[in-house]
Amino acid sequence: MVNTVEYSIETKGLVKSYPQPRNFFEFFRGTEKKPVTALDHVDLKIKKGEFFGVLGPNGAGKTTLTKILCTLVLPSEGEVRVNGYDVVKNGGGVRTSIGLVSSDERSFYWKISGRENLVFFAVLNNHSWSRAKERAAEVLEIVGLESAADRRFETYSSGMKQKMAFAKGLLNDPQTLFLDEPTRSLDPNAAKEIRHFLSSLSKQGKTIFLTTHNLAEAEQLCKRVAVLHRGRVQGVGSKRDLGRMLTRGERLMLVVSGLEKPGISRLETLSVVDSVGVEGLGGGRVRLTLELAEGSVSTVLSEALKLGLQIHSTRTEEASLEQIFEKLTTEEV
Ligand SMILES: Nc1ncnc2c1ncn2[C@@H]1O[C@H](COP(=O)(O)OP(=O)(O)O)[C@@H](O)[C@H]1O
Ligand SMILES: [Mg+2]
């Protein structure tokens, strides 16, 4: 059957909360604990063939989201479809159409070879014995591990183990591939190889859903990125979209002297100023970092002069993805 859905992944109002474990005393006293909200009304639409990234710090909810999309965890609320299948009503359909690359090496058997591992998993995926052997050989070739295929899994380097995770994720030739922090704990060369490999998979038209806390990686690979923080999507779009969403314009750095507290408040209340960072430099000098609306540098400078500040240096810069990310994930939400 040809799957003609437009979106590989669709979530609407997705919520996941985990009950908080109670310790002995809390249990004994009947203390109620509020559940942890790992995902808070997540709405995403990811088109077929897209290379989509979810960027977020530890605890943001990336693994929870990946697990829900792969039917390993059930959502608490909301609608979730993967390749057109509902994750709650048709988990089986989802599973036959996806591959998951997890960085958990414990899912492999260490005392048998890489090839034997893959044949075993292919049989679990309902392949016949002979087809399983064939498919294992195919995926070993795709990830470039043929020459080491008959060595015990435990002798592999971390880069090779990660390639094995890929090989496993590709066994059923999935339409959509999920990767939860695939380059985490890899050395730079191995990570580079993995990224290269991911780009080529994407060119073959597969939908790729990748989570990462590595900005450069998201920037290099993904067409679109969702920034996730405390279970909420803070923004979705290309790097440029995110930049526009977050900073209304520019960052102005000033080194000044003669600044008093009321001066800072005055600057903060200007409508063109988003935020003011203050750092003492000693000798009465202060570095101000101001996030401004586009084209408002002169307004702010003239206001600073009106306040009687002495301006020693000025510098402006555009927000980098790193700063955007920092801003998105450090502000209280
Ligand atoms: N099985 C679980 N039981 C209780 N809380 C959990 C469980 N899994 C994750 N959490 C909590 O959900 C939040 C999101 O975790 P996770 O999805 O692992 O984030 P990430 O992968 O972005 O680091 C965290 O606060 C985490 O402590
Ligand atoms: Mg995680």
Image: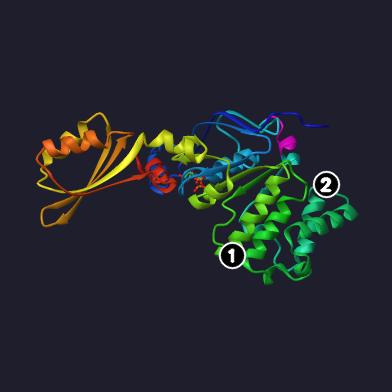
Q: Position of residue 9 (x, y in %)?
A: 64, 34
Query: In the rendering, at what x and y percent does residue 196 appear?
Result: 64, 55
Image location (x, y in percent) of residue 217: 54, 52
**The residue under label 2 is which amino acid type?**
Asn
**Residue at which label 1 appears:** 189
Quadrant in which the N terminus appears: top right
Label 1 Cα neighbours within 10 Å, binned few <14 / some 14-19 / many ≥20? few
Q: Which three-letter amino acid code belongs to the residue tagged 1?
A: Asn
Quadrant position of residue 158? bottom right
Observer able to see residue 95: yes
Task: Where is residue 258? Give x, y as percent.
Answer: 9, 46
Figure label count: 2
What mark, if any, has residue 126 been given in the picture? 2
Q: Mark 2 and 1 residues: CB-CB less than 8 Å, in contact?
A: no
Element class at badge 2: loop
Q: Which part of the image, by quadrant, shows the C terminus?
A: top left
Main secondary structure found in the magenta portion = helix
Q: Is residue 163 left or right of residue 234?
A: right
Range of magenta residues: 89-94
Res 332 seen here: no
Q: Residue at x 71, y 63 (%)?
A: 109
Q: Residue at x 14, y 53 (%)?
A: 285
For label 2, count other residues whose C-alpha is less than 10 Å away and answer few (under 14), some (14-19) or many (20+).
few
Decide which of tag 2 and tag 1 comes sooner along the chain: 2
